[in-house]
Amino acid sequence: MVISLVMRYKKLTTLTIDSAQRKSLLPWVVLLAGFLAMYLPTLYDLFNGVWRTDKQAHGPIVLAVSIWFFYFKTQDLKETAVPLKAAPILGLVVFVLGLLMYVLGRSQSVLFLEVGSLVFILLGILYTFWGTKLARHYWFAFFFLLFVIPLPSSLVDAATQPMKIAASYGAYHLLSWLGYPVTRFGVIINIGPYPLFVADACAGLNSLFTLEALGLLYMNIMRHESALRNALLAALIIPISFTANVTRVTVLALITYHLGKEAGEGFLHGFSGMVLFMTALSLIIVVDSLLRKFSLWWESKKNEKSGMSKTGASI
Amino acid sequence: MSELVKISFGKSLLLAILMAIAAMGAVYAKPKLQAGKEAPSLESIVPHEFGDWHEESESDQQVSLSTDGEKSQDQPYDQVLSRTYVNSSGDAVMLALAYAKEQKQDVKIHRPEVCYVAQGYTLLSKNDVGIFLSPNMPTAQGKRLLTKRDGRIETVSYWVRVGNEYPRGGLDARMVIFKDGLKGKIDDGILVRASIIIPNEASADEAFEKQERFMADLVRTVELTAPGVLTKNKND
């Protein structure tokens, strides 16, 4: 027991004392320290600010997935040979651009610039040490990182209102088709005695972006054969997310109508996000399998045609 | 793989120093709230009687200043005031003020065209207007809206002051906040809105002029005790 402990201790000390290892680790530590000096305060503000609001609550999930994806692509490197050729000048240009964005964004609380700078800083570092080929290996990880950037508030404001009105419009029509006593004024739905305000969160902008991001990730990892099918699915996520939102608002209205205001509020805070994601997820799966069937049918038809023309030519 | 792990110490030191400078630069460049500038109390600076106008208990329900029913932290205002005034000839004007002491990029004043539409009103028209206040004050750059919901037609005139500007749109407002921020200044902001319920669209022009004269009267009175709250400062 004691011996094994001593041995383990020796192993540990030899590990830490290994000077070659330390030498290669030191630059990483320095780099990480600088990076954290910039982005720890940003992360702190995000967690205590926009990521706590309903509108941009998808941030942490997308960030976690994004970090995981960088890790995934790094593991991937063991099997793929990527030629390394440092591009320090290009790297420094991109890096400094990122720094400027950061200083402007952070000091003036323009989150879009502040968090957006992360992409430039990471890309700049990659270029500086390893060059463009490696950056290309990570391209989807960088693309995915874009979804972490909080949308500029002017864009959110401009898009939220029509999406809210559309969601209430859809829910209103569905409910009146089902025979419920509903009226609608803008984003206010009156069902029986209860007025319901369709809140900003119900506009579904955040769920749209989360679904789009996760959908794209799914397709990238699955490496679907057909580009057309990928593009179609990416485009269809928009109506899917809208349908899921209408479902959420309708379910909320029904619960309030049948079980009272308190039940509705309980549902709103606890369960409505779940309904949204379940609806969206099942719709995506259904649409994806339909698309697969369609593309298989399309391929076979194309093959038939080309086969026929070939035989025609030979005759 | 080993090529990936071994990176040059010189390069990483340079990048780290640059990142540390940026982190400090951002803290240094952050605008600070002007000390000693107390937020005015709207309730106390807006008189219950001025000129030919006196306050009446709110009979008509005013259109709320927010876009939804949420009483959340999202609420961007520090103070709101909503009153109805009448004059000797029996005209009634509704006044709504919303003041925010700190205007930041992500929290800003909701514009009436957004609030009214959110509450089920249709915008029949929307035009820019310069509202004359007094000979020695700059014209307030605002908007005229004609709105309708069911049988209720309402003329709305308003302006938004951010810092020392009258931005006409959300993007304009953000530019003002950004520019003043670079000078190290945090802007305050106010929405000044007056509206009249009219029987038909034909009387809209008359109502617009009436409510804008009311706004000018109000500004001239408030300016005596609390200059630069509702409007831009003269000296700019």
Image (cartoon, coloured by chain):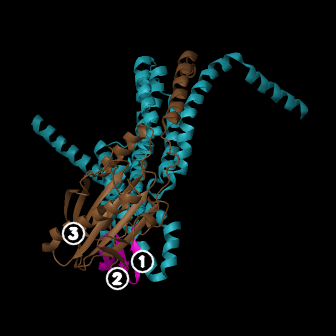
Per the rendering, the colour in which chain A appears is cyan
Q: Which residue is mark 2?
A: A180
Q: Give the side of residue A180 with respect to residue A46, left or right.
A: left
Q: Residue at x 58, y 29 (%)?
A: A32
Per the rendering, the colour in which chain B appears is brown
Q: Chain of mark 3?
A: B
Q: CA distance from mark 3 to mark 2?
A: 44 Å
Quarter of the figure that contains the C terminus of chain A:
top left
At which x and y percent is residue B15? 52, 23
Marks 2 and 1: CB-CB under 8 Å?
yes
Does residue B214 sit above or below A239 in this rendering? below
Q: Which residue is mark 1?
A: A254
- Disc tally is 3
Q: Which residue is mark 3?
A: B210
Q: Residue at x 26, y 50 (%)?
A: B138
Does residue A206 sit above or below A31 in this rendering? below
Q: Residue furthest right?
A: A2
User: Secondary structure beneath disc 1?
Assistant: helix
Identity, as a three-letter code, of the amino acid under mark 2: Tyr
Q: CA distance from mark 3 to mark 1?
A: 46 Å
Instruction: Kindly report which numbered mark, 3 or 2, lies closer to the viewer in this rendering.
Output: 3
